[in-house]
Amino acid sequence: MTDLGIPLDHELARHDFLDRPVSAKDELYCLGEFLYRQQDAAEFLQFLQFLCQNQKSAAGILRLLGAQTLQ
């Protein structure tokens, strides 16, 4: 149990890129930290395009998408 009385094995609800709850029956895809449904693929690409419009946030967005430093 946590300090809040919540069992540790309790799975927290997952959400898609628009913060909508997802269920086990949803067909989900993942790009970095973002989940999206197949029927939302075009809207997801528009969301990514919107995020990329601010040049200052480019490095953070790339990290969210899984970018890593090569050694």
Image: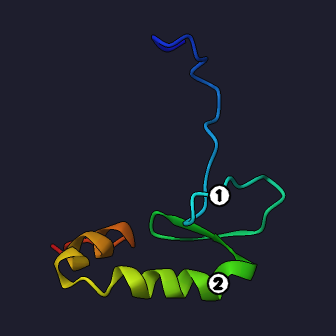
Left or right side of 47 for 13: right
The residue depicted at 36 percent of the width and 79 percent of the height is 51
Report the number of discs. 2
Left or right side of 23 for 18: left
Q: Amino acid at mark 2?
A: Ala
Pinpoint residue 58: horizontal percent, then vertical percent.
24, 79
Pinpoint residue 35: horizontal percent, then vertical percent.
58, 66
What quarter of the picture does the N terminus occupy? top right
Q: Amino acid at mark 1?
A: Arg
Answer whether labels 2 and 1 touch (C-beta < 8 Å): no
From mark 2 to mark 1, how far is it between C-alphas? Answer: 15 Å
Q: Residues within 10 Å of mark 2 (few under 14, many from 20)?
A: few
Q: In the displayed structure, would residue 56 be above or below residue 23?
A: below
- SS for dot 1: loop
- SS for dot 2: helix
The residue depicted at 30 percent of the width and 69 percent of the height is 63
**Quadrant hosting residue 69:** bottom left
Q: N-terminal of the two: label 2 or label 1?
A: 1
In the rendered structure, find residue 20 and report the number of the disc placed on it.
Answer: 1
Q: In the displayed structure, would residue 40 be above or below residue 18?
A: below
Q: In the displayed structure, would residue 22 be above or below residue 5?
A: below
The residue depicted at 16 percent of the width and 78 percent of the height is 56
**Quadrant hosting residue 6:** top right
Q: In the displayed structure, would residue 55 be above or below residue 4?
A: below
In the rendered structure, find residue 41 and report the number of the disc placed on it.
Answer: 2
Nearest the viewer among 67 and 71 is 67
In the rendered structure, find residue 53 and report the number of the disc placed on it.
Answer: none
Viewer-nearest of discs 2 and 1: 1
The residue depicted at 79 percent of the width and 53 percent of the height is 24
Q: Residues within 10 Å of mark 1 (few under 14, many from 20)?
A: few
